[in-house]
Amino acid sequence: MERCKQYFIAKNAPFLMERIQELSESTATVELAAAQLRCEPSQIAKSLSFSQKKAMSKAEAKVHQKMITERRKQQQQQQVDGSASASPASSLTTALSDATVLVIVAAGDAKVSAKKYKEKFACHPKMLKREEVEPLTGFPPGGVTPFGLNDDVKVYLDVSLKRFPYVYPAAGTTNTAIKVTLDELEQYASNAIEWVDLCEEWWPEEGAAATTGVRSITDNSSTNGMVENADIAAKKAENEASKSAEAGVTV
């Protein structure tokens, strides 16, 4: 939570820091968070952490494998000698230095579609292991927030959030949350790249504000291009068509 607060101070947004809620019980899952905040589970903005390995040449792969082998030998020797091993953060960061880490912020009732993910990033989705989350994002599992992530983490905002005027992301720990508007999420999320349509199994709700047209996300230091927001009505039609198709299949 303190890291999140310091991030808002650095971004000259103390008003957001004041909105952080520290709750008496865990908010580590969508259901727990919704119960604590007394909101719909779909209004919880969950931050999902993924890794994408960079393509390596044969020579780079050979060097990388040699480094891994040497590291394992060192760890085995340290265990024999009884000496202190390298910290989990440093070893994980080194081991995954050839990977890109990204966070997808999505509505609580949405699930990342493997098909859409692969179409977008040209690889299969691979979530970070529990022990990798904190050293690579800066926050523990269940407390990952879009605000104050490690500098090299890229953030993508899923259109499933656009049904609501405001949402509740975590605020850095497993018992904190913060209420933000979509504009605030865009403006203050760490290294926000763009709005994306990567999720499935969510349904537009009556009265939700559907937005269309072209909109870009900027992050003080850079402009990351423009993307066309998904049309909520089109999304609903797509889901209904998919449901109808599935109903016609006999297993």
Image (cartoon, rainbow, N blue to C red):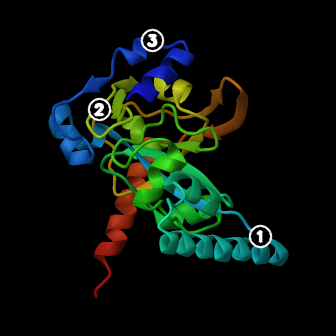
Q: Which numbered marker is on residue 175?
A: none
Whether residue 84 is situated above or below residue 140 in the rendered picture: below
Secondary structure beneath dot 1 equals loop
Horizontally, residue 107 falls left or right of residue 74, namely left
**Which residue is farthest right?**
59
Q: Is residue 221 visible?
A: yes
The residue lying at 48 percent from left, 66 percent from top is 114
How busy is the neighbourhood of tag 2: few (under 14 within 10 Å), some, or many (20 plus)? many
Spatial distance from mark 1 to mark 3, Cα to Cα? 43 Å
Q: Amino acid at mark 3?
A: Pro
Q: Amino acid at mark 2?
A: Thr
Secondary structure beneath dot 3 equals helix
**Which residue is farthest bottom?**
251
Q: Tags 2 and 1 in contact by the CB under 8 Å rule?
A: no
Q: Quadrant of residue 143?
A: top left
Q: Which residue is mark 2?
A: 176
Quadrant containing the N terminus in the rendered view? top left
Q: Is residue 103 visible?
A: no
- Reading the chain from its start, which is encountered first: label 1 or label 3? 3
Q: Which residue is mark 1?
A: 56
Image coordinates of residue 93 in percent, x first then y, are: 60, 55
* Residue placed most toward the observer, 168 or 77: 77
Q: Which numbered marker is on residue 14?
A: 3
- Reading the chain from its start, which is encountered first: label 2 or label 1? 1
Q: Amino acid at mark 1?
A: Met
Secondary structure beneath dot 2 equals strand
- Reading the chain from its start, which is encountered first: label 2 or label 3? 3
* Residue placed most toward the observer, 55 or 245: 55
